[in-house]
Image: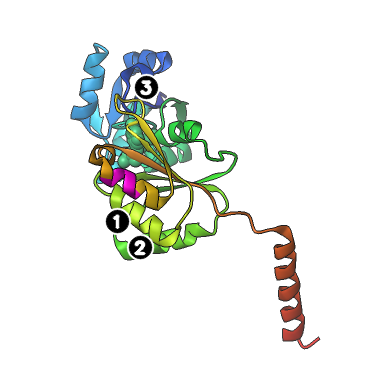
Amino acid sequence: PGTLYVVATPIGNLDDLSARAVRLLGEVARVAAEDTRHSARLLSHLGLNKPMISLHEHNEAGRIDSLDRYLEAGEDIALISDAGTPLISDPGFLLVRELRARNRHVVPIPGPCALIAALSAAGLPTDRFVFGGFLPAKPGARRQALEAWKVREETLVFYESPHRIVHTLEALHEQLEGREVVLARELTKTFETFLHGTPASLLAQLSSDPNQARGEFVVIVAGAPPVAQSEQQAIDADTLLETLLGEGV
Ligand code: SAM
C-alpha cells in the first residue's frame, strides 16, 4: 500500500518549502488539498501538474474511503493545506486518525507553521505554551475562553482571523489588562512585524497606524504570574482544614 505524506507548505515565503517537500510533491501520485485552486498555483510554481482531490472541513469524512482506496492500490498521496502545516487549525485530522486506525503509513514532512514561527521570535517564554487555535468570534464565547485561559501560567498562543484583531485586543484589555502581548504579523512576508506591548498600548499602536491592523496575525500572550509557593501552601492548608472540618474530624 501507499503512504500518506502530510506536507507542510509555506505561510508566505515560497522559499520556505523544504527540499524534501518539493521532492515528494513531485513523486506522489495525487495531492489532497484544502483548496485545489489555491494549491494548483503552488504546484504549477514547481512545474507540477498532479491529479488533485479537495479535502476541506465540509467533505473530509466522505473522502476518507476513496483516498484509502488509492493507498490500497499502492499510490502515495500528499496532503497539503492552504498554508503551513496541515491539521494545525486546518483539515486532515479525521483522515489521519482513520488511516492510522486502518494501519496505513502516515509520514509527516515538517516545515512552516505560523504558531511555531511566531513563538520562535517573539521573546516570550516558550518552555511551556498553550495553543488555543482561533478564539471564538462571538463575544460571550470569547469571554468564556479567555476566562479559562487567564489563570494558565503557560504562554498562550492563538490564531486570529484578519479583521478581528482590534476586537480581540479589546477583549484582552478587558480581561487580561496589563499582560505582555506580542502580535506576530505577516510572518515570512514583506511586511512582517512583531509588535510588543500591553493590550492597551497595542490598541493605541494599531489606531495610530491602521496598516498594522491588516494581514494575518498570531497573538501571543504571557502566561499568568506563577502563584507563589508560600501562597500555594497557605491555600493547601486552608483546603486541608476545610476538609477536616467538613468531615467532622
Ligand atoms: N496550518 C497553518 C499553520 O501551520 O500555521 C495555520 C492555518 S490557519 C487556517 C490560518 C491562521 O494562521 C491565520 O488566520 C493566522 O492566524 C495564522 N497565520 C498563517 N499564516 C500566517 C502568517 N504568514 N503570519 C501570521 N499568521 C499567520
Per the model, the C-alpha gap separating discs 3 and 1 is 38 Å
Label 1: element kind: loop
Q: Amino acid at mark 1?
A: Ala
Reading the image, the residue beneath label 1 is 137
Q: Earlier in the sequence, mark 3 or mark 1?
A: 3
| Dominant SS in magenta | helix
**Any magenta on residue 166?**
no
Q: Kindly identify the amino acid type of the residue bearing the numbered disc 2.
A: Ala
The mark lying in front, picked from 3 and 2, is: 2
The residue carrying mark 3 is 76
Tell whether label 2 touches label 1 (CB within 8 Å): yes
Extreme-right residue of the structure = 249
Say if residue 73 shows up in the picture: no
Crowd around label 3: few <14 · some 14–19 · many ≥20 (10 Å)? many
In this view, 51 is above or below 127: above
Image coords of residue 65 (percent x, y): 32, 38
Residue sitting at x 38%, y 63%: 143
Q: In this rendered view, identify the residue nearer to me: 20 or 154.
A: 154
Depth check, mark 3 against mark 1: the one in front is 1
Q: CA distance from mark 1 to mark 2?
A: 7 Å
Residue type indicated by callout 3: Asp
Residue drawn at x 37%, y 22% as measured from the top left: 76
Tag shown at residue 141: 2
Q: Quadrant of residue 190?
A: top left
Q: How is the image coloured?
A: rainbow
N-terminal label among 3 and 2:
3
- The secondary element bearing badge 3 is classed as loop
Quadrant housing residue 39: top left
- Label 3 near ligand 1 (CB < 8 Å): no
Give the residues drawn in magenta, as a range. 203-207
Of residue 10 and residue 47, the one placed in the foreground of this image is 10
Q: Judging from the image, what secondary structure is the residue with disc 2 in? A: helix
